[in-house]
Amino acid sequence: MKNNQLPSFWVVIPAAGIGSRMRSTIPKQYFTLGNLTVLEHTLACFLDHPQLLGIVVCLSKDDQCWSELSVSKHPLIQVAEGGGERADSVLSGLMALSEQAKPDDWILVHDAARPNLTREDLDKLLFVVSKDTVGGLLATPARDTLKQIDSQGRVIKTLDRKVIWQALTPQMFHFQQLTCALQHARKMGMIITDEASAIEAMGFSPLLVEGRSDNLKITHPEDLQWLVPYLVTTK
Ligand SMILES: Nc1ccn([C@@H]2O[C@H](COP(=O)(O)OP(=O)(O)OP(=O)(O)O)[C@@H](O)[C@H]2O)c(=O)n1
Ligand SMILES: C[C@](O)(CO)[C@H](O)COP(=O)(O)O
């Protein structure tokens, strides 16, 4: 689709995690894949987009790596201090835009740990969700049979996978609506693991846009082995 059919947008990149499930000495967003760090791969998908207004990268207050990257000097990138949870980091990133973003500006929140987003999926999300009144997210339909377990880890039922989708990122919402939703979730003490769930808690139903299942979030050590071939050949 043509760029003039796509909305302009801001990006918030939560990159303040410690990667505990990776069991590594450095945060996974700074692993090197090919010739770039995971975070640089993630940023690359947005930085040459003609509709990009700017990016906020949310960093841990103890981050020692960001300033070593040449991309840290990019004129379209600013940083914000992340928080204890991912939702806190995202809210901090939104606060950093409070003097720049207009209430109805589109915000895309994308995990630093998802370096394999394609331009095709990004533009598909922008095109489809820009026509929606609520906002939405990339997601992929469940491919495996899914089981619900009890507290002992025993199967209590098999879920209907025709109605189960796995949320990905970017997740795309209007600046004011997303800010209010995350502030509401924080005030209510809700456990929020993605932006859409904060929007849902306000009574809205975000739109799902099917994305590639290889838009992987690096979470466990074995996730890396699948990612390197993609990043070396397609980035
Ligand atoms: N307080 C936090 C926690 C996570 N994130 C970011 O949110 C994304 C998705 O989170 P996750 O995969 O859980 O990353 P970590 O929290 O680092 O991993 P873990 O849960 O294994 O510690 C990552 O890019 C991570 O850097 C963040 O900005 N601030
Ligand atoms: C936002 C997300 O990537 C959507 O699937 C996911 O909720 C992040 O979870 P994490 O535990 O913070 O990695």
Image (cartoon, rainbow, N blue to C red):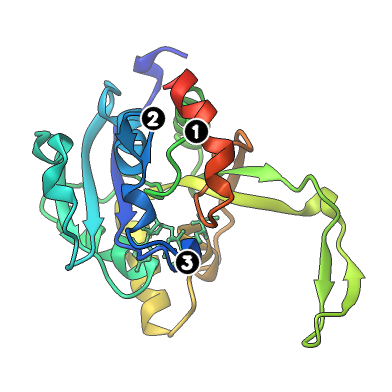
100 vs 70: above or below: below
Please determine whether, in this image, residue 14 is positioned above or below residue 100: below
Residue at (49%, 77%) from the top-left corner?
191
Residue 169 lies, in percent from the top left, at 48, 46
In this orientation, which residue lies closer to the viewer: 101 or 114?
114
Q: Does the CB distance between marks 1 and 3 fall below 8 Å?
A: no
Residue type (three-letter) at the residue carrying disc 2: Gly
Residue 131 coordinates in the image, percent (x, y): 49, 34
Residue 15 is situated, as x and y percent measured from the top left of the image, at 31, 55
The answer to whether residue 163 is left or right of residue 156 is: left
Crowding around mark 3 (Cα neighbors within 10 Å: few <14, some 14 to 19, many 20+) is many
Q: Is residue 105 visible?
A: no
Question: Under tag 3, what secondary structure?
Answer: helix
User: What residue is pinned by disc 1?
Assistant: 228
Find residue 50 and report its image quarter. Answer: top left
In front of the other: 126 or 212: 212
Q: Between tags 3 and 2, which lies in front?
A: 2
- Residue at image mark 2: 34
Q: Nearer the viewer, mark 1 or mark 3?
A: 1
Residue 198, numbered circle: 3
Real-space Cα distance between discs 2 and 1? 7 Å
Q: Are marks 2 and 1 in contact (CB under 8 Å)?
A: yes
Q: Nearer the viewer, residue 30 or 216?
A: 30
Q: Give the residue displayed 47% in from the left and 34% down from the top.
A: 117
First along the sequence among labels 1 and 3: 3
Identify the residue at image location x=75%, y=54%. 164
70 left or right of 117 in image: left
Amino acid at circle 1: Val
